[in-house]
Amino acid sequence: MSDVLLTGSAPTRPRFSFEVFPARSGAAALALGNAVQHLAAVGPDFISVTYGANGSNRDASRDLVRYLRDHTNALPLAHLTTVGETRQAILETIHAIMDAGVHDFLALRGDPPRGASEDDPAVSGSLSSLELVKLVAQARAERPAFTSVGRTSVAAYPNGHPLSRSRSEDIDWLVAKQEAGAQFAVSQLFFNADEYLSYVSDARDAGLTMPVLPGLMPVATAAQLRKVAELAGRPAPAELMREIEEAGGYAPELGVEHSVALAKELLAGGAPSLHLYTFNRHERVLAVLRELELLAPVAV
Ligand code: FAD
């Protein structure tokens, strides 16, 4: 599979980006402040901030985006979701984020709030990610001074989203997001390189030209591995699970090893960049990038 096939552009040196989420306590906020300084220092393409995921506070998300903007050199990318919000409220949120100097977004429908199901009218009646991509474009048009900056990204699901009835429907939906104005996609977690590579290849055949950044998370614990399996929609690799459990349930070096092996296959297959889910820690994702020799040498 060629680089051009996967990225839609000429080969470039692999890049990387990170995802963090708002802290839920004062102590966690202090630790996160330290982590993002380390993450920003290695020059990622962007650091994305989740929004309302797992019931987290949306104001905290906006605060973290502003913190990245004001206190690091990294480009912040704000996740936006539509669940439970009116079109007008979402538009106001986008404008508030843009007015704070942040112009890059990941447009999402969003997870159902705790205790709600997909059938809940507040969830099923929400704007889709496709409509949100168009709303971001509208918000940009309403702030003409900002129209030349900022990119809109969307989510992609190598193993399918629970709401999709088939891979082709899932891919058609991703292509529709591109046609609505999305400039790149970030993938859900997965365990095998071929799940991502074959998905992107099929999407290219269906007309997708935008880059799809593969999402990776180096886990430290058995609980994190189970969470990744839930998101990936696939069972966790049995051997990795056994090894982590034999190590007492905590084995960060095994998570790093697995992510490095996966990243090597993805990059060899033409993945344009790596998007690392940090779990608000810098040590493991930086260890992965160091092993892959993607970090610039430290000046002495
Ligand atoms: P959509 O793209 O609107 O739909 C998801 C899938 O449903 C589509 O891929 C498609 O298969 C199917 N589908 C929906 N509508 C149609 C249609 N009309 N026709 C055909 N198929 C359709 N959640 C949060 O709450 N906060 C976050 O910060 C967050 N960050 C995320 C970051 C990434 C990289 C990813 C992959 C997910 C993230 N999520 C987050 C989870 C996401 O919000 C959920 O997976 C949600 O259920 C779907 O959001 P979406 O934007 O992918 O939805």
Image (cartoon, rainbow, N blue to C red):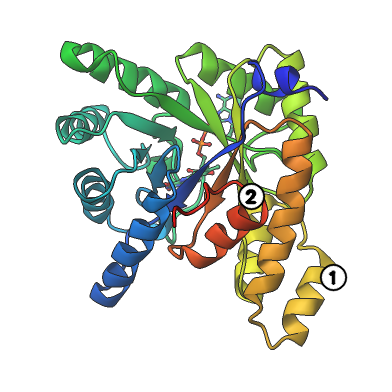
Mark sitting earlier along the chain (1/2): 1
Tag 1 residue: 239
Q: Is mark 1 within 8 Å of ligand 1?
A: no
Residue 249 at least partly seen: yes
Residue 40 % position (x, y): 37, 50
- The local crowd at label 1, few if under 14, some if 14 to 19, many if 20 or more residues have their Cα within 10 Å, is few
Q: On the picture, is 51 further left or further right than 146?
A: right
Q: On the picture, is 184 further left or further right than 137?
A: right
Whether 230 is drawn above or below 270: the answer is below
Tag 2 residue: 293
Residue 99 % position (x, y): 14, 30
Which image quarter: residue 2? top right
Quarter of the picture holding the N terminus? top right
Q: Nearer the viewer, residue 86 or 215?
A: 215
Q: Nearer the viewer, residue 154 or 89?
A: 154
Q: Secondary structure at mark 1?
A: helix
Whether 25 is drawn above or below 65: the answer is below
Q: CA distance from mark 1 to mark 2?
A: 26 Å
Residue 108 % position (x, y): 44, 36
Which image quarter: residue 225? bottom right
At a point 73% along the width and 23% down the height, the residue shown is 3
At a point 43% along the width and 63% down the height, the residue shown is 280
Label 1–label 2 contact, CB within 8 A: no
Residue 267 % position (x, y): 72, 38
At a point 51% along the width and 66% down the height, the residue shown is 283
Whether 206 is drawn above or below 1: the answer is above
